Image: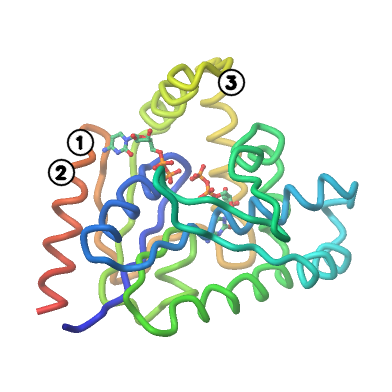
Amino acid sequence: MNRISIAIDGPAAAGKSTVAKIVANKLNYIYVDTGAMYRGLTFQALQKGIDLQEEVQLLELLKKTEILLKPSENGQRVLVNGRDVSSEIRGSEVTNHVSIVARHRMIREEMVRRQKNLAAEGGVVMDGRDIGTHVIPTAEVKIFLLASVEERAQRRHAENIEKGYPSDLETLKEEIAARDKLDSEREVAPLKKADDAVVIDTTSKSIDEVVESIMTLAMERIG
Ligand code: CDP
Ligand code: CDP
């Protein structure tokens, strides 16, 4: 059977990783969370006290940083130079700094190089901001997920409450809107729908409905 590539892009908390993981499982494909790679580098830079505006220093750090995405029972573990940082990279410190790191051209070039290698054989579901436009422009299926900022903040809020983390809906809304703005307005590979991507507004859709739509498109291409 034809092993295709599926690119899923969209703003923060639109549901990309949730549906990408399910689709990858159903097809027995690998899932690559590219946001976790930018988060892993941001974590490492914060740990080392590197100025996040310093592109060359960040690139030097990235060259010394192995970021591994390992499938696990509850999704995916992220290992940075062998250390499991899966929880740390979701915290607010990394979340509120990652878009500053992701703005730099040299950082993006190195990340995209690594991501293209991961996608080279096909049989991949990759999510991020520039997958359909830059990382896998030849992907057979390209999806652009959307949801209102209120809905997305509400989803993150519900996740925090479920995990027992402190959470404030208004702050989340502001943080998500600020990150969307940085990601959409940056010069290099901004968050943008690829011309040939299918838009799915998930605001009032269930996870199953979104998965179903993507699976239908995928099966058409797999044949
Ligand atoms: O899960 P969430 O949507 O909140 O974020 P993420 O996918 O983990 O991505 C974190 C950040 O990494 C984004 O806000 C972008 O600044 C950056 N990113 C990027 O620039 N390009 C990608 N392909 C993926 C993430
Ligand atoms: O990867 P991204 O930041 O785009 O989103 P996520 O980490 O998958 O988070 C989305 C959250 O919204 C999860 O808690 C999902 O359970 C929930 N959700 C969804 O993903 N899709 C829907 N249609 C409805 C809810």
Q: At numbered mark 3, what does the secondary structure look like: helix, strand or loop?
A: helix
- Relative depth, front residue between 116 and 12: 116
- Relative depth, front residue between 152 and 23: 23
**Residue at position x 89%, y 52% in the image:** 50
Crowdedness of circle 2 by 10 Å Cα count: few (<14), some, many (20+)?
Answer: few
**Residue at position x 40%, y 32% in the image:** 152
Q: Which mark is residue 171?
A: 3
Crowdedness of circle 1 by 10 Å Cα count: few (<14), some, many (20+)?
Answer: few
Marks 3/2: CA–CA distance: 29 Å
Marks 2/1: CA–CA distance: 5 Å
> Residue 204 occupies which quadrant of the picture?
top left
Marks 1/3: CA–CA distance: 25 Å
Circles 2 and 1, Cβ within 8 Å, touching? The answer is yes
Q: Amino acid at mark 1?
A: Ser
Q: Quadrant of the N terminus?
A: bottom left
Q: Which mark is residue 29?
A: none
Does residue 160 appear left or right of residue 18 in this picture? right
Q: At numbered mark 2, what does the secondary structure look like: helix, strand or loop?
A: helix
**Residue at position x 40%, y 57% in the image:** 9
Q: Amino acid at mark 2?
A: Glu
Label 1: which residue?
206
Q: Is mark 2 within 8 Å of ligand 2?
A: yes
Label 2: which residue?
209
